[in-house]
Image: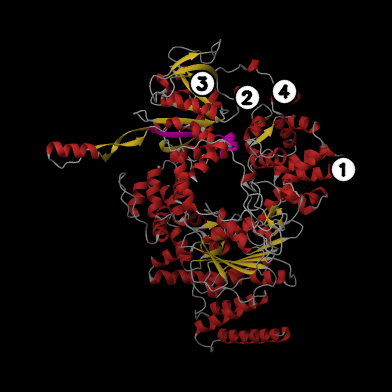
Amino acid sequence: MIRELAELLRLAGEAPEAERLADALWLAERLGPPAFSEGPAGRPASTAGPDGAPGPAEQLPSGVPPSAAPVPAPEQRMTSAGPDVQKALYLPEARPALAGTGAATVRVTAPAALPQRLALARSLRPLTRKVPSWDVTVLDEEATVDGIVDTAQWSPVLRPAPSRWLDLVVVVDDSVSMAVWGDTVQEFLSILGSVGAFRSVQQWLLPTEEIPTHGIVLRPPTAERGERLLDRNPLEIVDPTGRRIVLVASDYVSPSWADGTLDRLLHTWGQYGPVALVQLLPRRMWQRSALNVHEVRLRAGMPGAPNARLGVTPLEGTPSVRHPFTASSMAVPVLELDPRWLGPWAALVSGETSAWETLATLIPASPAATAPDRPSPTDRTTPSPEDLVRDFTQHASPTAIRLASHLAAVPLSLPVMRIVQQAVCGTSRPSVLTEILFTGLVTRADQDHADNPADETLSVTFDFRPGVRQVLLNGARQSQILYTLSCVTEWLFGRLQRSGAPTTDFTALLDGDPVAVNAARSVRPFAIVTAQALRHLSERYEGLARQLEESAPPGANSPVVAGTTAVPGEQALRVNGTVPPVGVLLDRDDLLAEIHAGAFGGRGAGMVLTAREGGGTTSTAARYVAMYGHAYDHVAWLTAGRPSAGRELPDLLQAAAGQTAATWLLVVDDARPDDLPASLPDGPGTVLVTSADGGWPQGFVSHSVPPFKRATSIRFLLDRVRGLTAPVALRIAARLDDVPLALAISAGLLLQSTPDALLTALGADPDPGAQPAAPLDDPAATVCALAQTQAVRECPAAAPLLDLCAVLAAGPVPTRFLTQALPRTYDAAVAALADAELVTVTDDGSHVFIPAVVCRVRRERMNAAEVVAAQRLARATFVTWRATTATTAGDNSDILNLTRHLEPMGALGDADPAVREAVREQVRLLAKYGDAEGALAWGKLALERLGDHDGTAGTALFQLLSEMTSDTARDQRQQGP
C-alpha cells in the first residue's frame, strides 16, 4: 500500500521523502475521516434538508455585495450523496434560510492570497539546519558508557542538544497603503511559522508614516494605529550573536523609504545578521516604488553572514546617482514573494551557495550623511489629468485599467475598492489595486473629509487627483457606471440596515425615494461622488444629484438625545426623557452590535446590562440610544426611582397606542427587578435595563459589561494625563481593576497631584520597581472618596453641593433646582465637581448627572446632623420651587423629574404641612400628566411614611388616592378582561 501511494504521488508530480510520507500517514490516521460526505465529483455534498430546499452558501469575502455574486449555473450546483438530488447555492442575503425549510450553511473556501504556499515553504528548506544549543543539553549515552568503563565512575556526560539555527523577525510596514496587503502578509507569516526552520518567528510593525513626528520605532502587531504606548527601540531586535534574520515586508511607497530616513536602520541591522527586503509589489512595478535597486553579485564567505560582510559587485553599467557604489557600500537584497527569489536567497544565507546575482538596494557607509535628492520648486511641473490617465494606461495592466474606470464612480475607501475589485476583476491579486493607488492617479484625501462618523470602515483614505475622475468617467460606459454604483450601494445600504436604518435599495435611490436619499446622504463622501457619477450619466438625474450634494439633515443617522427631542425626518422620532452624556466609553462597539442584534424587532424583548458599580452600564445604554435609536419609532429614557415613576412612560404609551407595527425602546436606568413598570406599549419593542443587580427574572437576557482591557485603560490614562508614563499608568489601572469610572476620576486626581501621591493614597507601593498591587475591593468608591476630598480642598464651595447630592437620588437633577438651593456657590461648585469627574452636565446645561457611588460615598462620610441639614435644604427648595415656579410645560417637566428625589430627601415622612401639601400636589401632577400608576405608587408610599390620616394633608392625600383607585378600576372594567 505504501509503495502504491508513493508511486501515485510521483505520478502527480510529487517526490515524497520517506520521513515526510510517514508523518503524513501518522497524522491522517489520527485526524479521522472528513466531517462531510463526498458528492459524485469529489466535492462536499450539500447539507440541505430532505425536502430539497436550497441551502445558502457562506458569504463572499468581507464587503462583497450580493448583487456582485454570479448566480450559480446548473453545472456549478453541489449535489447530495444521492445521484438524483441537486442542491443550489445561494447567498444568505439573496435567499434567507427560514426555519423548517431544511436550508443549511455550506462553507466555501476563499482564494488564498499566496497561491504557491507549498513551493514557498520548500524554497526556505536550506535554512532548516541544526546547530548545537547554547543552553539545552542532552545525555550522550555512548560517551557516558565509555566513561563508566574507563573510570568506573557513574557520571553522566552531557552534550549540547541540537537546536534550530536561526530566529526570524518580520518587520511589516504599517503605512496606510499596506492595508491592501494584510492578507498576503498574514499568509506569508503562516508559511514562515510552519516551515520548521526557525527557533522563533516574531512580527513587528514599523509605522513609517509617523517617523517625521515620532521617530523610528517598532510596535507589536496588536497595537492600534497611532498608539504609542507599546513603542520599542528598533535596536531591541538585534542579536549580537548573528543568529537572527530580519525580513522587512513593504510596498516601499512611503516617503521615508525614498528620502534615506531608514538607511541608518537597515545599516545597523545589517551589521549583526542577514537582512532582506520583501517587496510586495510585482517586479514590473518596482521602478515606481521608493527603492533604488541595482543588479549586483553577492558573495558570502560563511553561513549566516551579515549584510556588512557580503561581497558586492555591481552588474549594471551606471552606478546610482542617489547611492553611488563604493567599496564600503552595504547591499540589502530585495526579494519578491516568489520561490524563485526566496530559494536562492535562502541558499546564500545557509551557505549552500557562495554567490548570487540578484537585485539589491545599496546603503552607503554613512547613511546619516546622505541627503535625499529633491527637485527644486521651479523644476516641478503639474501634469494635466489627461496626461496622468494617458501615462497610466501606457504602463498599467489591462486589468488595472478596467478597474480604474469602475472606481471613478465611487469614493476611494479600501472596503469599497475591494468590493469593486472583487465584482469586476474576480480573484485578482492586490497588486492590481496597488497599480491604481500609487501610479500617479491617486492622492491622499484631505483629513477634513477623511473620516466618516457613520462608520470607521467607510473612512475615505484616497481620492483621485483633480480632474482625473472626470476623465475616467468620460471613457467609461454608462452600463459599467450603473453596475459599479449598484454593487457599492447595495453593500452600503446593507451595512446601514444592519445598524437599524430603514430598509432601502439602489432602485429606490434612483427613483428619488426620500428614505434612500437620506441614507445615501448620511455618508457624505459616497453621496458627493455618486452625485457626480449620476450627473455624468444623464440630465434626468440632475435633481437627484443636487439632493445628494446637500448636507444630511440633523439626526439622519442618530437622534439628539438630550431632554425630549424631536428628530427631523419622514417620521418624527421623539426621545422622551433625559439621556445622560455618554462619557467614558471604549471597547464597547461589539457589545452594542450584539445588543442590537438581539433586541431590535423583538416583541417586548428584555435586555439587561449589568456591571459592578462604575462599570459603565449607563454610558453603554446612552451610546446605544445614540447609535441605534433611529431604528425605533418611539424611544423613552426612564431613570428608575423607588417606586419607578416618570413622565416618559405615559408619553411612550400614548405615542405607540394603536400602532401595532410601531417599534419602541424603553431604557430603564439603574433599576432593580421591582422597578420596572407594569404597563408597556403594544407592538414590537425592547426594554433595555441598566443595573448592578445580577438576579433578573426569566425573559431577560443579561449582558455583562466588561471593564476596560488593560491596554485600553493605560491608553486612556496616558491620553488624559500629560507626562504620565506607561509603567505608572499600568500600576494605577491594575489597582483600580480597569473600572471605567474609577479610571476617569483618577485622571482628574492626577491633574492635581503626583502619580506617587495617588498610588500611596490607593494603598499601592509608589516605588518604580514595585510590582502592580492587587485590585481594590471597591475601586470606584475608594477613588471617589479621594476625589471628593481633593475637590473640597481646592474649592470649599463644593462641600455644600456634595452634601445636597448625597440626599438626592442618583441620576439626573434639574440644574435650576440646584441653583435655587445654592444660588451663590453653585457655578464654582459644579465646575469643581465636573473637573474631578464626580458629576457630568448635559450639553444644554439643563441637568446634572450624579453617579450613585458619589451619593453613597458622600452620605457615608456625613454625620447625622449634616444629613438632616442637607435634607432640610432639599425639602425647602422643593417647596419653594413648587410655590414660585410658573406652571408652564417646561417647568412642570422639571418638577415631575423631582419625584424620584422625594424619598431620599425625606419629603414623604416630613410632618411639615407645607411639605405634605407639596407631596400631595406632586402626586396630583403625576396623575394629571397620565402617570396614574406612578401616582398611586408614590401616594401609597407617602401615606405609609406619614403614619396617620388625621392631618389635613394626609386626609386630602387619602381621598385623592381613593378617587384615583376608583378611576383606575372603572377604566379596567371598560377595557374588559
Closest to the camera, between mark 3 and mark 1, is 3
Residue 378's quadrant in the figure?
A: top right
- What's the mark number on residue 540? 1
Secondary-structure class at tag 4: helix
Front label number (4 vs 2):
2
**Left or right of residue 907: residue 53:** right
Q: Quadrant of the C terminus?
A: bottom right
Secondary structure under badge 3?
strand
x 14%, y 36%: residue: 150
Residue receiving disc 2: 284
* In this view, 326 is above or below 141: above
* Residue 546 on image: x %, y %: 80, 43
Task: Report, in whole angstroms, how far the alpha carbon at label 1 lies from the one at label 2.
Answer: 44 Å
- The residue to which callout 3 is attached is 360
Amino acid type at circle 4 is Gln
Q: Which residues are magenta?
A: 165-182
- Decide which of tag 4 and tag 2 comes sooner along the chain: 2
**Amino acid residing under circle 2:** Arg
Q: CA distance from mark 4 to mark 3?
A: 27 Å
Q: Which residue is at 74% across, 29% downward?
A: 468
Q: Which residue is at a point 41% across and 33% down the rendered structure image?
A: 128
Single out the mark in the foreground, 1 or 2: 2
Q: Is residue 291 above or below residue 31?
A: above
x, y (%) of residue 588? 54, 54
Point out which mark residue 394 bears. 4
In terms of secondary structure, where does tag 2 sit? Answer: helix
Which of marks 2 and 3 precedes in the sequence? 2
Decide which of 108, 584 is in the foreground and name it: 108
